[in-house]
Image (cartoon, rainbow, N blue to C red):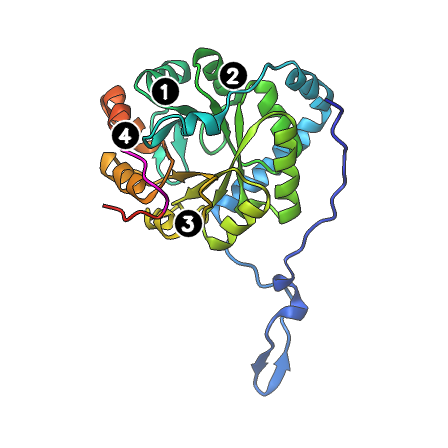
Amino acid sequence: MPPLAQTEQEPKYDTRTLPETQEPVCLLGVTRYPRYPMKRPETILDRIVRSKRVEVAGLEGRRTELLARADGRGTPRSLAGALTAAPRVAVIAEVKRRSPGAGKIRPSLNPVKLASTYEGAGASAISVLTDQEYFGGTLEDLSLVRNAVSVPVLRKDFIIDELQVVEARAAGADAVLLIVRILGDDQLAHLHGVAVEFGLEVLVEAHDGDELERALAAGARIVGVNNRDLSTFKTDLGVTLDLLTRVPDDVVLVSESGIAGPSDVSRLGAAGVDAVLVGEWLLRQDTIPRAVSSLTESPRRPRGGQPE
């Protein structure tokens, strides 16, 4: 694989916050224009993305090493194939210690033992959170899990740079997550292309109609509809149900977040969802094998069917 070109991107500015675009204010009969930008409150997602920029800056010195390790990896396992192999809703089970929204979930988990349990109970793929600051995960977790299971392994992180894609492949990932909300259109298409070039499949995540259209325009073959708003971390299963008829039949549809048991999976499957990504609910169960198994029994019906 030839070295990735090092490109310098021009900074992007949100013109809506520039002083000249603000509404004038009239005080005591004198019209004044805002002197400083009107900034929206910083969200958790903003803080996470800022931390990713710091991480990416530290990867540049490892470019040659990461490319060599990525090139040395064998053929990735197909995530799309695993999620559509059976006529039932597939389960992507997640390895996650904590989250900004839920706090500590299972902080002392053993990633290998947990992933092996997931696979043994019928999970079609494993998602591994690799963000350390906010979710308590590491790339080592992913590498250990990949070596311990035979199903595809997804790197779930906040990817904003091509070196994170290379890093994922070097660690053994079979697929990566790209979040539409944190990427521009050109950036999304570029990262999707880099992932495909390295043999990785891509779960492209959207939360609303505009993001879904952008995901499809970027060439997404696996679309994840996140029921959680990453700006507020509130969840609503209706997000998937509202958007699913806009997903082409030949695109794999994954519903993410807010899934709290077999009844939710059954409802989503009846509407045509191909797979669910479940973390917190599974991790809070006393008997994880039984919990995973209970999610794998729902039939998958054609897209747009009426939920039960």
Q: Bounds of the magenta span?
A: 295-303
- Mark 1: give few (<14), some (14-19) or many (20+) Cα within 10 Å: few
Q: Which residue is mark 1?
A: 108
- Mark 4: give few (<14), some (14-19) or many (20+) Cα within 10 Å: many
Spatial CA span between label 1 and label 4? 24 Å
Residue 214 horizontal side relative to residue 115, left or right: right
Residue 56, visible in the rendered structure: yes
- Mark 2: give few (<14), some (14-19) or many (20+) Cα within 10 Å: many
Q: Which residue is mark 2?
A: 143
Mark 4 / mark 2, whichever is N-terminal? 2
Residue 240 horizontal side relative to residue 266, left or right: right
Q: Is residue 52 above or below residue 291?
A: below
Q: Which residue is mark 4?
A: 295
Label 3 sits on a secondary structure element that is loop
Mark 1 / mark 3, whichever is N-terminal? 1
Q: Which residue is mark 3?
A: 232
Q: Residue at x 42, y 24 (%)?
A: 125
Q: Amino acid at mark 2?
A: Ser
Quadrant including the N terminus: top right
Query: Which of the 4 quarters of the picture holds residue 301?
Result: top left
Mark 1 / mark 2, whichever is N-terminal? 1
Percent position (x, y) of residue 267? 27, 42
Q: Amino acid at mark 4?
A: Leu
